[in-house]
Structure formats: structure tokens, C-alpha cells
Image (cartoon, helix red, strand yellow):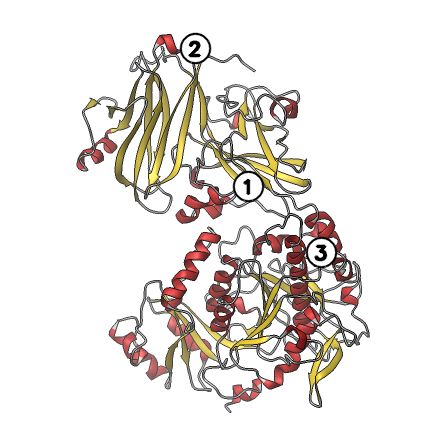
Amino acid sequence: MDEQDQLQGRPNDETYDRPRVVVRFREGVRLDNRGELGEQIDRSSLGSWRKLLGQFPGLRVRPVFTLVRGNQLEELIRRAVQMDPTYKPADFGTFFYIDAPSDTDLVALARTLMRWNSVQTAYVDRAGPPPVNPSDDPQRVNQGYLDPAPDGIDAEYAWTMPGGDGAGQRLIDLESGWTLDHEDLAAHGATLLHGSIYDPYRSHGTSVLGTICAVDNTIGCVGIVPALEAVNVVSFYGSSRPDAIFAAIAHQNFGEVLLLEAQVYLNGTTLLGPIEAYDAEYEAIRLATALGIVVIEAGGNGTNNGSTPPLNMDTYTTLSGQAILNRDEANPEFRDSGAIMVTAASAAAPHTRRPYAPHGRRIDCYAWGQGITTLESVPGSLTNGYTTGFSGTSGASAIIAGAALSVQGGVEAQVPPQARFSPRQMRAILSDPATGTLPSPAETTQIRVMPNLRRIFDEVLHVAPDIYIRDFVGDTGEPHGGAISASPDVFLRPAPAADPQAEFGAGSTLADSAALGWTAEAGQDNYIYVRVKNRGGAAATSVVASVYWAPVATLVTPDLWTLVGSTTLPSVPAGDVLTVSSAIVWPQAAIPAPGHYCFVALIGNAADPAPAPAEFLVWENFTTFVRANNNVTWRNFNVEDNAPDADDPSTPDFKALEFIAPGAPDRGREMALEVVGRLPPGAGALLEMPLVFFRMLQARQLAADAIIDQERGVARIAVNPNRRTNFGDVLFPAKSRMAFRLLIRIPEENRDQTFQVFVRQVWQQQEVGRVTWQLQPRRAQP
């Protein structure tokens, strides 16, 4: 064994977690894994491998991800993108281990690699011991973590509820050792799915599983969720942590729980932290959560004697200086894996953080980190050992995993059965201060809350609200392929409503009206209302609705949004009762000009957080998010008088409908404009466009006869007033803002009627936005 292997008490096995460097090449870099990879690096001009060997002799290269490749990996990524539109896939083929002799300065090696232009990042990979301190603190003789809050998580109460004992749920524990035939575990029939069992760590995994799911029998302990449908394990012994995560992913479905019982040394030091601090593990975890797998992650431990300090996630930076664990809204370097991050606290209430335990805004939950009564595996009693002294973030993470499985069991057991919570929903529930136990007021570090299952079952699961805002009249809150810009549920009024609920809510004649929006009036405050439905089983509380304005445009990406304001609906009743917010005042000083605006509304509460605008900046997210998520909507539905604009000398016989057709926020894309008229016989319609757009149409031979106005720099092309006119794909430059007018002439004899016309923007045969106008007789001021 070399010196570092002796330090960790493990065999010198290059396939295991010996100290090494991980290099992540930039996206698109490929090594074919045939022959000597170092020579390929030289041949591909990725960097000077020979020069690197001269400085650091004895290096070897091998891929990090070996378990899942090709079509299987592509299918996982396809499913992940479909299930989580915010997921941006990693290029898993760009990760490589650089193995080095034991006397190599690994930090210097990583820094040298980071100077290569082909390298995105490099870091030292060195596994820490299991995140547990078995000699920590006085032992307790009972399982107090099962007790009611504030002492424990109140698993005893959850057992009285359908599914609260974990019935129907599945768990995979990732670490390196277990005694699966322990007398309090054998009934689960757990299977090792990947890797090998490392004997010195059998006791650790046995204690973790005992905390979570020890069988409810007449001997020993009882776990938080003793009735699990399946318990299995994957080991990173004889493997790597990224491959072990992939092995777990291959056996898991949406809503199942993956527990990560591991920690790593950070930046080549003795500072211990979560495995997602390493890029390869982060990307594997992010894929898991995108696939809907609930990941519980130990935050890492220091030592009780202070020789290794606890990790402050708010101040930690990588070798390249990035604050990847600082969950500060102003920190662009933070990366969110979607995992639930756990730290350890005292057993006694009021709870305080254990001296060795990590802290910071990235922490989602704490739980007991001392005196945990559970199973043990020791020589001489391998299958019937018990301990009263399990501890550390390992114990805390096991408790949080048990809570997650209990909550999933509870929601799935409802009548009618409800879908399991997604990873982000589960994280929001378990970390919610409204349903959790806060730490001691004397605790000065950030460790969030310990879940209280009684309150979660009473206030979340039995309530089980599902709030949504309609994308169009008839939207039921399900993912759909319909319009995404015609919401009837966010609208402007020039005067406040005396009783918004009575005027616009359930039972009113306007409950399903899409024509409530008015043009913004200049010189006065205007008033915006939001309507919400709840298709769940009981009321949703403290629902926040935020509204943004944007110019009338066929594509309303977040770079066009400006916040108007927010309002809170105290309660949204169950049963699809249309509930109206109080007015969001749009002050006269904040209104750019009179006229129509597009509105974007985001709704959410603590259990179902609203998406952030930044989540829509990735184009692929933007194109799928609204249809797939029922707590965001667009209103680009404008009500206009159908009489001509007599004060516009350029179009005396027409109603001019102004809009812009923007490009995507990231790069130029080929898109098409399409006008769809629903106008009466004898009506006329022209699309007035910038000459630059007209010339692009000409270059593609898509332009028909046009009226050219060189002085104004526009061209007008006739469109079918009662059918579809598609102008074909042209290149819309990134962030372009081309101004258009749709010119409509309604015959005088039809101006006592109402008609609709819309323009939509199409990308790859998919509508990505539209503007709709309802043309009707002049309306009286409300």
C-alpha cells in the first residue's frame, strides 16, 4: 500500500477511490478510448502530454464514466430532458481520471491541467471516510429520533397514516459496506446491485439501513419506514462514485430515493465535503434528479477535536475560485444538483449543529447526528448487533431519507392515488420552516430545519393542493399541446374592482372570459389581477403570484420581462374553484406608455415553488416549460376596437395591431411567422414588416407581391383574412427585435360583431409564442 492508501485503510486498487486528479475537457472533446489516451491527447493537440509527463512522471489516463454509454446514456438524457425541462445535459464523455504515483503533487497537477485551453476544469479526487463519528457524544438508549417534534421527526405519527410506513416505496443506499442478512434487515431481501462490499465499512451501511428501515418485528429496532417495497444497495468499492450513481439510476424510477453516504476531501486538503463538489459526481447527481429520483446527500464531516474544521458552504471555493456551494441568489457560480443536502445536529431539543457538521445556505435539512440507536455489524455478532451510538451526517442523512420515503408513501397512498413528489417538490417540503423544526435560536450557522412528519402529513399530504393558472380557457392543469399565450387568468383593468372574486371568480359570468384585459391607461395607476385554480384535495395557503410585463411580441423570452409586482392569495380552495387575487397596482410612473402589454404570471407557494425567470433563459427549457408546468402562464391576448384608426394617415381604412417578433436570447435560429385570421367575408389583412425581414423572405423566395414604403423602411404583404398564411423559415438573429404591424380592415356592416386574429412564431414546427387579438365593438370603461 502507498502512504495515502494506508492512511485510508484501503487496498491499492486503481479502480477504487485512490487519490487522483479528474480532468474535464471542454464540451465536444473526444478520446476514442482505444490505445494510449495520453498519446491521443498529444495527437489531438489538446495539450502537451509529453511535457506534462516530464513534469509529473508516471501519469495514466482513463475515463470516469464507463458503466453507461451510447444509446443507453442517450435514452437516460432524453428522458431527463423530457421530465425536467430545466436540465442541461452534461457531456459525460469529457471526464477522465489522471492516476499518478503517490508522491505526486496532485494540486499542482490539477492547476497545470487547468491552464490547457482544452480543459474546462480539473480537481483532486480523494475519497473521505464515511461521514460518521462513531465515538461521538454520550449514547442514548432509545430511538428518540422517531419521537414527536421538537425532539424527533415524529415517524410514530406517520405510521398511523396510509403509506407513512413507506409501503410501496423503494430505496437504494450508495456507500461501500453492509451486512444485508442482519436479523433486522434480512426480510427486505436487499441485493448488492453494483460494486463490492468492503468489510471494514459493513457496520456503517448496516447502521444506515437500520435507521431507515429496520423491520418491524419482535426483536431489535424499528426503522422510520419498515414497510418498504424494496431495499437495495450499490457500492463504489471496486468502482467509482460516478459509475455507482449511474448503476443506481439504471434501477430507479420517478420518485424513488437514492441515499448518498459518502464524502470527499476538497481541493487536495483535509477539508471534507459533499461528493457533488466534484464535477463528475455533480453531473451524475443532476442527471438523477432530472430523471425524478429524490437524492439525499450527506454534507460531509469535520472532526470533533477540531483538527479538520467543518465545511462552510457559503465560503468554500474550488481550485479555480468558484463558489459552487454558495446558494446566494446573487452568486452566478452556484450550481444546484437538485439533491437534498443534510447536516447533523444535537439529539436534544432545542437542536444545535454538531461541531464537526457542515453549514451554509446550501443545507436543506438537519437531523440527529449523535446517539442514534440502530443496527450494527461487529465481529462475533455480524447479524444481530445493535448500537446506541451511531452519529454524524451519515445518521442525519439516513433520518432524512426515511422522512422522504414516508412522505412519498403518504402522497401515493391518497385516495384517489396521487403522483409521487418530484425531487424539487420533496426538497421544498422537507426543508419548509412552516412544517419543520427550527434549530435553537442560539444556533448562529445556517442548517435549515428538521422535518416534522406530523405537520407534513396534516398540512401538506392531507391537503395535497395542486395550484395552477390556465394557459387558455379549457386548460385543466395537465401538460398540453395547446396555446401558451392566451391565458384568461392574468389581465389588466384601468379601474380597481370593488369585489374581484364576485366580478371575475367562480360563479361569475366572466369566470371563463378571455376578454377581460384592457389597454394600459396613461396618467393613472392601473390594476392587474391573477386568477388561480386548485385541482388538489384541500386548500393551498400563501400562494404568491408575481406578474411581469413585456412588449406585445410573438416570442416573450425572459430578457423582455420587467417585474410589475406580486400579491399573495391567502387561501385557494380545493375543487377547481376559480380564485381571484387582490390587485397588483401598476403605478403610473412605471408604465412605459399607454397601450397593450404582454403579461407573464408565475404562481407558487412553499410546497410548490414558482420557477425563476432564469430557468427560461435556456432555449430548450423555454420551449417546453410552460406546457409542462401549470404554475406559469403568458397572456398575449389583446382586446381591440374593430373600427379603423382614423388618426393614422398611413392606414386610414385599417386597424393597426403592433407587435415585435424577437429572436431567441442565446443565438440566431430559423423560425417562421404565421398569421391566422378568423375574419368575415370582405375583410382585408396586410402584414407590415421591416424591409430587412422582407429581404430575407425574398432571399428564400418566400415573398409575394409587396407594397414597398422606402421612406418608412417597411413592406406590406397581403395575408388571407380567414385562413392561415405561413411565411416560412428565415433566420431570426439572437436578441433581435423586429417591429411589425398587422393591418386589419373589418367591413362596416360587421363592426357590431367580434372576431379574432393571431400571429404565431414557429420553431421546428412547434409554436413558441403567439399574439392574439380579439376585435370587437368599442367597450365602455369599467
Q: Whole-percent x and y of residue 420?
A: 60, 54
Q: Quadrant of residue 21?
A: bottom left
Instruction: Say which of 189 and 757 sits in front.
Output: 189
Residue drawn at point x = 35 percent, y = 62 percent: 27
Q: Whole-percent x and y of residue 479?
A: 49, 43
In the rendered image, the residue lying farthest to the right is: 141
Helix, strand or loop at label 1? It is loop
Locate residue 50 relative to residue 358 in the image: left or right. left
Query: Which callout, 3 or 1, points at the residue further toward the start of the chain?
Result: 3
Count residues near mark 2 (Cα–Cα under 10 Å), then give few for <14, some for 14-19, many for 20+.
few
Locate residue 659 relative to residue 392 in the image: left or right. left
Kindly identify which residue carries mark 2. 752
Q: Is residue 205 above or below residue 225?
A: below
Kindly identify which residue carries mark 3. 162
For the residues carrying marks 2 and 1, which lies nearer the camera in this image? Answer: 2
For the residues carrying marks 2 and 3, which lies nearer the camera in this image? Answer: 3
Helix, strand or loop at label 3? It is loop
